[in-house]
Image: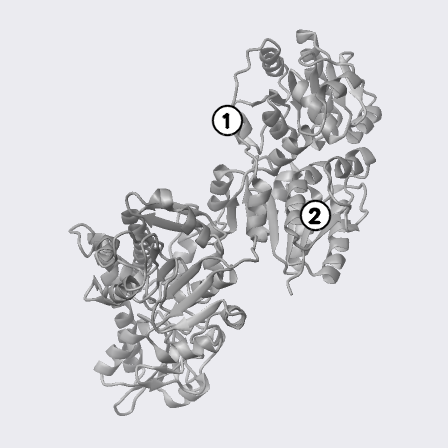
Amino acid sequence: MEGPLCFVVGTRPEIIKMAPVVHECVERKVPYILVHTNQHYSDCLDKIFFHELAVPAPTHNLGVGSGSLSAQTAKILARMGELLEKETPRVVVVQGDTNTAFACALAASHAQIPIAHVEAGLRSYDRRMPEETNRTLIDHMATYLFAVSHLQRDILLGEGIAARSVHVVGNTVADSVHRALSSTGHAEVLARFGVRRGGYLVVTMHRPENVDTRHPLEQVLRVLAGIAAATGVPLLLPLHPRTGKKLEEFGLALPDAVRPIPPVGYTDFLCLLSGATAIVTDSGGVQEEASLVGTPCVTLRLSTERPETVNSGANVIVGHDREAAVAAVGRAVDGLWPKWSDVLPRGAARKIMNVLAPPRTSTAGPSVTVVGLGYIGLPMACLLARGGCVVTGVDVDAERRALVARGEVPFSEPGLSEILREVVGAGRLRVRDAPGKTAFYVIAVPTPHRNGVCDLSCVVSACRDVADVCRPGDTVVVESTIAPGTCAKLQEHLPRGIRIAYCSERAIPGSTLHEMIHNDRIIGFGDGCREEANDLLALYRTFVRGEVLLTSLRTAECVKLVENASRDVGIALANEFSQVLDELGADAVDVIRLANHHPRVNILSPGAGVGGHCIPVDSHFLVQATTAGTLLRTARRVNEEQPRILARKVLAVARDRQLADAPPLRVGIMGVAYKPNVDDTRESPAKSVLATLVEAGCQVRFHDPLVMAWQELRSAASPGKLDGWAHILVIVTEHHEYEEWQSSTAVLVDNLGRIRSDPKT
């Protein structure tokens, strides 16, 4: 059974921003624990927020209290590590950039527990702030990164974080502000503090860079004095314990017009904030809260990690510039501050929980037929069934149908066997030899290429089978890789009133389940159908946690092909470099590795060629009906020639070393899958290596730890057995098993034709 979610808080902002997520978790009845590190150890900065935001009491209190950054971090790391050993949560959820968030994320990383970071991707690019280091490191440890906007998403992608890990959800502070303001009376709060709406300013200051040393604190006080003198408006300062302690330590006094008040609860603070003419602050969270309640914000910092508040016009950054601060506050007092639109819509907590714990219904979901139970169809059928759909799996292969019906996966894919057994055992996935009547039909059958042209025979056959049973209003979704314009042709085989959509898979063997769940998906609809897409969106969202994007049929058909064609070109460039550098007598691997140290260079690694069903064929499909595409066709030829070049290098090594006293030369191929650590041999470069060696008169055998039979050959029992038979070995596919392996009798060549080992030298 999966463990609970673990929510972590330790400071006022974390309690405020985590509260909506905890509420959503409670509402969905998802098991959870709530850990409070007690980084904020004052009742005013702690318990009152739990009470006002209706957050359940913490499950665990770590009691770390005050201390330096390093001391506090060390305490949290040690105590959180012990707790994680006992509780074993399935995800640790942290928020923001505090010592609490960083130390708890680090503890989870050490325990190999996935981390979810709420408010990911914020950057001020001011490394003097410890928060900037904290938030950056958390992002690079996290599995789930919940970004406020696409601006933060772009920052994360620019730092090399995978797009499938980043989810744009908005900001949970919007949920908290709405909840708090809807449950309190503003007039009573303002009367209690002796102020009237629009007749005062609010000040908050607590950041170490502003208050922990004398000179910056003096500068802040000078700014506040200038604002007071210029506006004649009183300034209300909820005094943070850190700030009060430092004022006393340095013997500094607040300006006369600045009225200190004790720290206040969240609802009281929001009432004061919403009634103020403006707020002067150094807090990141307050910048967001001010933009939500409509109060102009003047920030006493040199940078901000909340640029959307500045871009919208809600916030200005003035640092310690007294004149700039006075001018900004003056615009607010004079009613000249321009209006801004809401940049932080509500609903972030719901989106976060949709990723961490998608809602499940007790009633049966929509009925779906998946035609083709191969590398894509079977995982998709299993995920749909696990998401609550009633699924019928169809395949023409009787042996495959029998295996699936018994809950056995006919190929290797981590994690799939467990899901298949679950859904077959629960009766949510049934297997048939032909489609029945369902609401949705997913076509996921092979589309091989014949001389560079997409062979649609399997897709057309599946479409005709579906046409025999589908009814007006049903939806046919093509997942197979196809050439542009195919869906329009398939529509001709379907009865009138049947909707057709295209949603090509984005997955890779060995990681198919993770990629199907977390990758963004693109769905293409025909003219007049997009407004009816909600039911299909709901179907995909039963298992997809990435974004689901809608477009036209033709665009969707092209997107997948363009993605893989671009990868084909990148691989061809690397392979071409390897050939050029070989002729120049330079080591291609070293040259590319060192060239990639340039900040704007990212050359791929050369190898034996390109395999799989996607990259070797998608360029063909994209340009099969165009005259343009010279570069794409050239790249394809380069990659198709690469395995033959490797085979010729093997023959050259054998000839130079006179490995065979008499013909035939015995060559052992190590690894015949198209990529490491999978059993998929579709379009494997090893096939061209084999053909070239056989044409040269060689005897060839192979070993692959995951492929028992290939090209009418049986795998050797072990690498050692192949080593004992062969004159020369060539590693075509670098399985983990081969990484440290050394031959004992035969010359061993890598997938670039370089000698890795020669036992005779």
Among the 4 quarters of the image, the one containing residue 172? top right
Please give left or right for residue 303 compared with residue 709 in the image. Answer: right
In the rendered view, would you say 595 is above or below 401?
A: above
Question: Horizontal and vertical percent for residue 184?
Answer: 72, 27
Residue 376 can be seen in this image: no
Where the C terminus falls, by quadrant? bottom left
Q: What residue is rendered at 54% in x and 33% in y?
A: 345
The residue indicated by pointer 1 is: 311
Q: How many marks?
A: 2
Q: Amino acid at mark 2?
A: Val
Q: Which residue type does callout 1 highlight?
A: Asn
**Foreground residue, 462 or 467?**
467
Q: Is residue 332 left or right of residue 377?
A: right
Placement of the N terminus among the 4 image quadrants = bottom right
Q: Nearer the viewer, residue 92 or 481?
A: 481
At horizontal 49% and vertical 55% (from top left) the residue drawn is 542
Q: Identify the residue shown where x is 72% and y is 58%.
A: 84
Of 58 and 534, the residue lying toward us: 534
Tell me the number on the disc at residue 8: 2
The image quarter containing residue 321 is: top right
Q: Position of residue 716 (x, y in %)?
A: 41, 86
Of marks 2 and 1, which one's residue comes earlier in the chain? Answer: 2
Seen in the picture, residue 535 relative to 173 is either above or below; the reply is: below
Give residue 710's position: percent from left, percent from top.
34, 81
